[in-house]
Image (cartoon, helix red, strand yellow):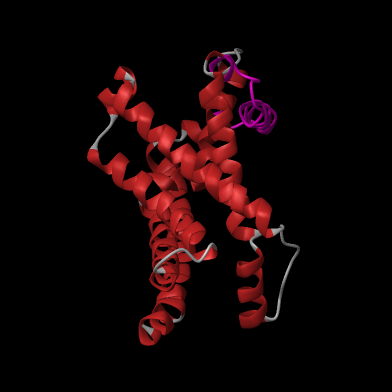
Amino acid sequence: MHTLYNFVSGPLAWLAFIIFFGGSIYKIVSMMKLAKKKDTAVYEYWDGYYALRSILRWITPFATVNWRKNPVMTVVTFAFHICLVIAPIFLCAHVLLVKEAFDISWWYLPDGVTDIMALIVIFSCGYFLYRRKTKAEVKFLTSSSDYWLLLMVVAPFATGFWAYHQLFGYNLMFILHMLSGEIMLAAIPFTRLSHMLYAIFTRGYIGSEFGAVRHARDW
């Protein structure tokens, strides 16, 4: 068990970060080159004002018609994304690990707060699964990869919650927590999780096209 822990917390963790940062840079650069080569309208239509206007509108809860039409989905979506990003970065245990490895640190949230945020992510994934199973229009567009993606996202939070509360088998669960987190991190540039990298650009382009070309709103 100790050998496995050292491997997962050492070489495998480094590999996951290298794949994440290297893959993210590669995907963004290759996307920009592809757009320049095959779809020059992306650059011709880009307008900073309309791009920023659209981005700000869509990252504000209930500021768009679609957000207002689906209030439950809106609340769950915003809570999920906020907790998904904030909890791992500002978790005390993660900050201490970085401090130990690189002698740098930053402010962290109380454990009770990150505990609740982990639960929000877990229950949000349950809600997304429920929608994919029960809503006809969502079910129609769902493939097996969507379920694997949900499992990939929920696993680090569920195992982390389990290990933190030291439930039975928590030593193994702690290793699974690190392993699932590393798998998710490495998968971000190469799966649909890559919308974390592209969302700003795609929303900015749509906002630019609607605002500067069609003279209409995209919300």
Camera-nearest residue between 165 and 211: 165
Locate residue 118 relative to residue 31 in the image: left or right. right
Residue 47 sits in quarter: top right
Work out whether 173 lies above or below 53.
below
Magenta-drawn stretch, dominant element (helix, strand or loop):
helix
Q: Pick the quarter of the image with the C terminus.
A: top right
- Measuring from the top left, give residue 204's x and y in whole percent: 58, 33
Residue 26 belongs to the span the image colors magenta: no
Camera-nearest residue between 28 and 10: 10
Work out whether 136 lies above or below 113.
above
Q: Residue at x 46, y 77 (%)?
A: 9
Locate residue 139 relative to residue 88 in the image: left or right. left
Is residue 51 something that shows in the picture? yes
Is residue 44 something that shows in the picture? no
Magenta residues span: 44-68
- In the rendered image, the residue lying farthest to the bottom is 3
- Measuring from the top left, give residue 28's x and y in whole percent: 47, 52
Camera-nearest residue between 22 and 14: 14
Q: Residue at x 41, y 57 (%)?
A: 184
- In the rendered image, the residue lying farthest to the right is 107
Q: Residue at x 59, y 34 (%)?
A: 78
- Measuring from the top left, give residue 103's x and y in whole percent: 70, 81
Residue 54 belongs to the span the image colors magenta: yes
